[in-house]
Amino acid sequence: MTLRLSRRAERLTSSLIRDILQVTQRPGVISFAGGLPADELMPPLDFEGLADDCRQYGPSEGEPALRSLIAERLSALGMDCSADRVLVTSGSQQGIDLVGKLFVDEGSPVVLEAPTYLATIQALGAYGAEFQGLPLSADGIDPDALRRAIARRRPAFVYLIPTFQNPSGYCYTDEVRHAVAAVLDETGVPLIEDDPYRDLVYQPVDRTPLCAYLEHAPWVYLGSFSKITAPGLRVGYLASSPSLFSGLVRLKQSSDLHTNRIGQAWLIRFLNSAGFDEHMAQMIRVYGERRDVMQIALLRHFEDLAEWRAPAGGLFFWLRLTAECDTLAALQAALGRDVAFMPGGPFFPATGLRYPALRLNFSHAAPEKIEQGIALLAEILGEYADRGRTRIAIRPSRACGPG
Ligand code: PMP
């Protein structure tokens, strides 16, 4: 008897990141691959004293005290958001999945950045989304290109990561934020704004959520505690404009009833504690230093191989290679020499916009390992880059960070 699975199941692909992460758990491997917080900076977990109530089933929308804290933070950023329109999710990844369930049928068009977050491509792709990628530069997407894409084929929604984007680290300028919001308001196309990196900021840049600028277009804003506390807690959240909220709550109920109450209770206590501000300051200081160490190492070893902008926040450098390169083969060689990176290819929603690139994480490896790992990577990529033959012209774009 043949096993009949859904079409969705047939479309599932494995995550290259998860596959690489397995290898990088080996002791001694210098990993620039995942987007992991530094182990030594995650706050210690102490569940003692949490209310016994957390053992019981809880509200699907999340713990009221956490929803209020989130609503306060989002309102302070200029968003129209009250606690009754905040849904606590099992990581912001679940928010992406719920959005897919709410909006995407087989063949539904979705507009997103190229490159964009790999797991969004996978999650929405599984629901049958057809992607229209917009080239991303250090200033953001081109608002006119967005308008043209919407006119060509009206998408179910536009998914953007305007602040310290994954994988590029780019941050939209204030001008682009306003212009993109204006196009969405004009056309009424919903915006899904994914914003898990906003608090990891190393130099002042505009970070106002695009959702705060919208007046008419429906929106969903996705946030996360993974990058600033501990991803193992699996606590993220979404907030939305009124018309979308009840659908998202019902979909959440059918997916897992509610988010982990113990994680939520721990977070409420941690966010309200005197230690939270200190923790954030330390994380920002240490990651900022690691970013600078990586920037110096890249200048030393990668100047002939790639172009990049030092990110003003987030967790990644995005290296655009100046020559064609089989980055998957280079990755195999790198793993053989105990250093890991993410090839850029899988971050592109469509092959047409692809160019050779790598994503390098700077939060996880210790500073002395960063210099060592970058030197090794440059040596390996130098062997795989098709230099001399196919040099790629890169259009200059304005930096959002230094360098
Ligand atoms: N969105 C983006 C852009 C991300 O980079 C990540 C994590 N890498 C997520 C969502 C998911 O994060 P989490 O589920 O841990 O909140």
Image: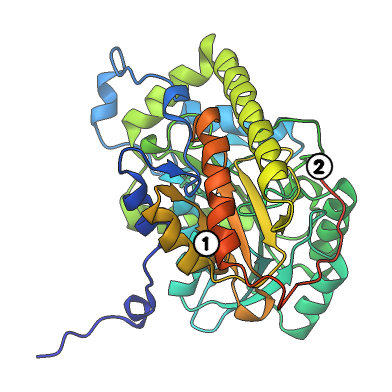
Q: Residue at x 51, y 56 (%)?
A: 342
Looking at the picture, how far across and down is residue 72, in whole percent?
64, 28
Looking at the picture, how far across and down is residue 396, in whole percent?
87, 60
User: Does 178 sit above or below residue 259?
Assistant: below
Q: In this view, does 360 lie to the left or right of 175?
A: left
| Residue that mark 1 sits on | 118
User: Does 390 sit above or below residue 70?
Assistant: below
Q: Which of 227 and 100 is in front in this view?
A: 227
Q: The disc labelled 2 sits on which kind of residue?
A: Gly
Q: Residues within 10 Å of mark 1 (few under 14, many from 20)?
A: some
Q: Which colouring convention does the figure follow?
A: rainbow
Q: Quadrant of the C terminus?
A: top right
Q: Can residue 226 be seen in this view?
A: yes
Give the Cα separation between the discs numbered 2 and 1: 26 Å
Looking at the picture, how far across and down is residue 192, in whole percent?
64, 58
Q: Is residue 277 left or right of residue 329?
A: right
- Give residue 403's mark: 2
